[in-house]
Structure formats: C-alpha cells, structure tokens
Image: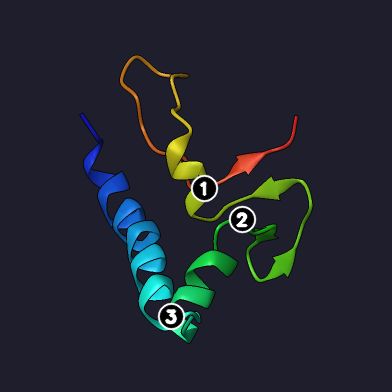
Amino acid sequence: MVEKHLIPIIDKIIMTKNYYNQNKSINEEIRNFWKDMIRFKKGEGYDPNYINGWIIKFIPNYEEKKPKLYDEIKRR
C-alpha cells in the first residue's frame, strides 16, 4: 500500500513520462518539480548540511514510536 503523502509525487513522476511521450519535451511545471527533488536549504540560504525536497518523503522516520515525515534531514 502506498502512503497517501506519496501519491501526488508518484502522480507527477507518471505525468512526466506521459507528457514526454506525447510532446518529446518537458514543460516548466515538470522542470520545476524535478528541480525540487533535492534541495540544500536551511531557511533562506544554502546549507549543505541539510537536505530537503520531495525525495525525503520516501525516507521513513522511525525515531519515535509512531512514524512521521521528515521536513528536512540534517547531516550527522
């Protein structure tokens, strides 16, 4: 079973494939989606010690008894 928070991301991945197959190009919406896959931001600035972006939604956080989503991941 796919977690509900992953459905919009998976839909965008499928949309990318379908759009490209039909148009042989990528539009601005799709380009921005892929640019947001991994970001190195903390607040307004660049910080290589933090990773955020939609890719971290695929990483489970089991530090607590109940799994929760990460907002960002800090390098140890």
Cα distance in 3D space between marks 2 and 1: 6 Å
Q: Residue furthest right?
A: 48
What secondary structure is marked by label 1? helix
Residue 1 circle label: none
Residue named by callout 1: 55
Classify the position of the N terminus by image quarter.
Answer: top left
Q: Is residue 73 left or right of residue 28?
A: right
Q: Residue at x 67, y 39 (%)?
A: 74
Q: Position of residue 11 (x, y in %)?
A: 29, 58
Colouring style: rainbow
Disc nearer the start of the sequence (3/2): 3
Residue type at tag 1: Ile
Classify the position of the C terminus by image quarter.
Answer: top right
Residue named by callout 2: 38
Cα distance in 3D space between marks 1 and 3: 17 Å
Between 10 and 48, the residue placed more toward the observer is: 10
- Could you tell me if the residues under marks 2 and 1 are in contact, i.e. CB atoms within 8 Å? yes
Residue type at tag 3: Glu
- Counting the numbered discs, the total is 3
Q: Residue at x 65, y 49 (%)?
A: 51
Q: Position of residue 31 (x, y in %)?
A: 53, 76
Residue type at tag 2: Ile
Residue count near mark 2 (Cα–Cα under 10 Å), binned few <14, some 14–19, many ≥20:
few
Residue named by callout 3: 29
Q: Residue at x 60, y 40 (%)?
A: 73
